[in-house]
Image (cartoon, rainbow, N blue to C red):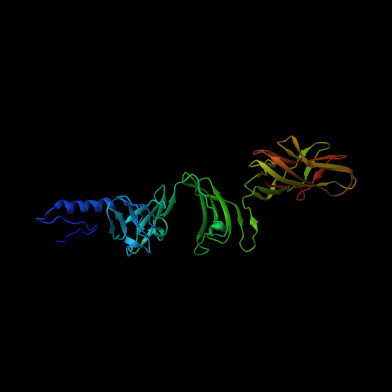
Amino acid sequence: MSDTSANLAMPFIQPSQAQKHVTHNEAIAILDTLTQLSVLSSETTEPPASPLAGDRYIVAAGATLEWAGRDGEVATFDGTAWRFHVPAEGWRSWDQAAGRFLVHDGSGWTELGHDNLNNVDRLGIATTADAANPFAAKLNSALWTARPTAEGGTGNLMQSLNRESTANDLGMVLQTDYVTKAILGQFGSTDFRLSVSQDGTNFRDAFSVDEPTGMISQPNLPRFKAKTNFDNFAALQTWTKISINETDYNEQGVFDPATNLFTAPASGTYMLGASLMFKEDSTNVVRMSGRLVTNGTDVISGAYGEISGPHAHLGTVIWLQTIANLSAGDTVELQGYVRGNAAYFAAEHSTFWGYKIG
């Protein structure tokens, strides 16, 4: 049987040993030194001139005087002399002077939380990391700041995300109560996308950027272009809603061919325009006006046009174009007006269009 313990080398009391209290007290002193190890410093190379009983240090490299040759060992002053303990892999200590934890890796002491966090499988901050989320943090705020040149940095801050191939996903997932509401990045392609979802399953692209050209697409932008496919009769001196009943395109279903109305799906600024061609035979003189009207009554500023001179022609066109601030649910319709003689607003060439710009 060994005379000392396997881990802390504490002396055992031997059978028939005289003065057993000496051995017992020595073991207690070792426990007092190494249990809950907290040293005054780990950067001191020579013993202090007036140590107190119980003072502990980790001897720094290049030690001198009584500490010479004891680099890396734990030194404690017992009130009379210095005693030394050789650390083993896994020992930990609090460095009071530096305000840091140290861990011994079998060859030397390193700061816990720096080198010893390399190649860890998981890291959780205020929460538990798991296999699906090997890094997890529960925070109310976070800050990344560039290391300034005065501290040896460059003053710049760049964050890189990398994926294995274009077939993989790369980006950010934004969630509410762990239901995905938006994704931003490159997902299975080279295009850069922002997509949103109400249910976390069905997504709509708000925009996408083509990688080769840098061109932006807004596939779900509220927009439409429509026309009438028949000649609309306009009675004399009566504002008439033009039956715009056939769409060339109609994103988000914002135009209703049955009612000939555009309905703003969301509050914002819209670009709106129209063309009106009226038809009459060459013997009748006609004057024509056109306008865009919200909610059936209000003429949109800048959306009124008129050909006030006398015209006797097979076809004359007037163009309307304006910007309007609309509230969600506002409707817009195209109206025409003739005087001098009744006339027709021509099929195919009488159109109505618009889209959201802000």
Front-most of residues 48 and 279: 48
Can you give x and y, in whole percent of width and height, for residue 310 in the image? 90, 44
Can residue 284 be seen at all in this image of the molecule?
no
Can you give x and y, in whole percent of width and height, for residue 195 in the image? 56, 51
Can you give x and y, in whole percent of width and height, for residue 121 in the image? 39, 58
Relative to 342, say whether 124 is above or below.
Answer: below
Front-most of residues 270 and 32: 32
Question: Residue pushed farthest top?
Answer: 297
Can you give x and y, in whole percent of width and height, for residue 229 in the image? 73, 48
Q: Is residue 357 left or right of residue 344?
A: left
Front-most of residues 188 and 257: 188
Relative to 132, say whether 283 is above or below.
Answer: above
Quarter of the picture holding the N terminus: bottom left
Can residue 301 be seen at all in this image of the molecule?
yes
Front-most of residues 254 and 153: 153
Q: Residue at x 34, y 62 (%)?
A: 65
Q: Residue at x 83, y 36 (%)?
A: 237
Q: Is residue 82 left or right of residue 254?
A: left
Q: Is residue 15 left or right of residue 217?
A: left
Q: Is residue 114 left or right of residue 303?
A: left
Question: Residue pushed farthest left?
Answer: 16
Q: Residue at x 65, y 62 (%)?
A: 213
